[in-house]
Image (tube, rainbow, N blue to C red):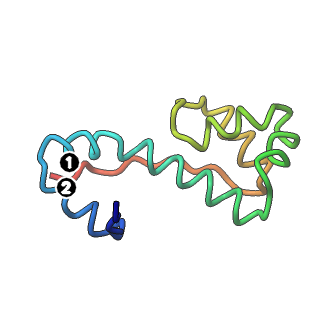
Amino acid sequence: MIRKSIEIDEWAEKKMKNLEFKAAYDALEEEFALAAALIKARADAEMTQEQVAEAMGTTQAVVARLESGRVKPSTRTLERFAEATGTKLRIAFEPRSR
């Protein structure tokens, strides 16, 4: 059996044409943005999940769940993550796109 490779951008473009898929994807935008911001902060600090966890006084599994977007962390948890990664937490409200 021969498998054809497909670029992620090409795959995403095709999937976004499905209105049901696009609506579900758009509904998760904030979670994806938070997960991406957490991963970026840790990467910019050149830290492993284990190092961030130690600095936060928690476990690597907790940091992994935060970065997965599967949990909605409290503001206090985000502050601890920011402190551990040497960053500053900022929360902003933006108008919804129409």
Q: Residue at x 51, y 33 (%)?
A: 70
Disc sitting over residue 22 in the figure? 1
How many numbered tags mark residues here?
2
Q: How far apart, in angstroms, are the residues tagged by discs 1 and 2?
A: 5 Å
Q: Residue at x 46, y 51 (%)?
A: 33
Q: Residue at x 62, y 35 (%)?
A: 65
- The answer to whether mark 1 and mark 2 are in CB contact below 8 A is yes
Q: Looking at the picture, does residue 59 appear above or below residue 52? A: above
Left or right for 6, reference 91: left
Q: Secondary structure at mark 2?
A: helix
The first of marks 1 and 2 along the sequence is: 2
Where is mark 2, residue-wise?
16
Under mark 2, the amino acid is Met
Name the spot of residue 81 as percent of width and height, x first: 72, 44
Q: Residue at x 21, y 54 (%)?
A: 15
Left or right for 25, reference 20: right
Dot 2: few (<14), some (14–19), or many (≥20) neighbours within 10 Å? Answer: some
Dot 1: few (<14), some (14–19), or many (≥20) neighbours within 10 Å? Answer: few
Name the spot of residue 55 as percent of width and height, x first: 86, 43
Q: Looking at the picture, does residue 72 appear above or below residue 46? A: above
Name the spot of residue 94 as percent of width and height, x first: 34, 51
Under mark 1, the amino acid is Lys
Q: Quadrant of the N terminus?
A: bottom left
Q: Secondary structure at mark 1?
A: helix
The answer to which quarter of the image holds residue 10 is bottom left
Name the spot of residue 69 as percent of width and height, x first: 51, 39
The answer to which quarter of the image holds residue 11 is bottom left
Query: Furthest-front residue in view?
Result: 1
Q: Nearer the viewer, residue 65 or 33?
A: 65
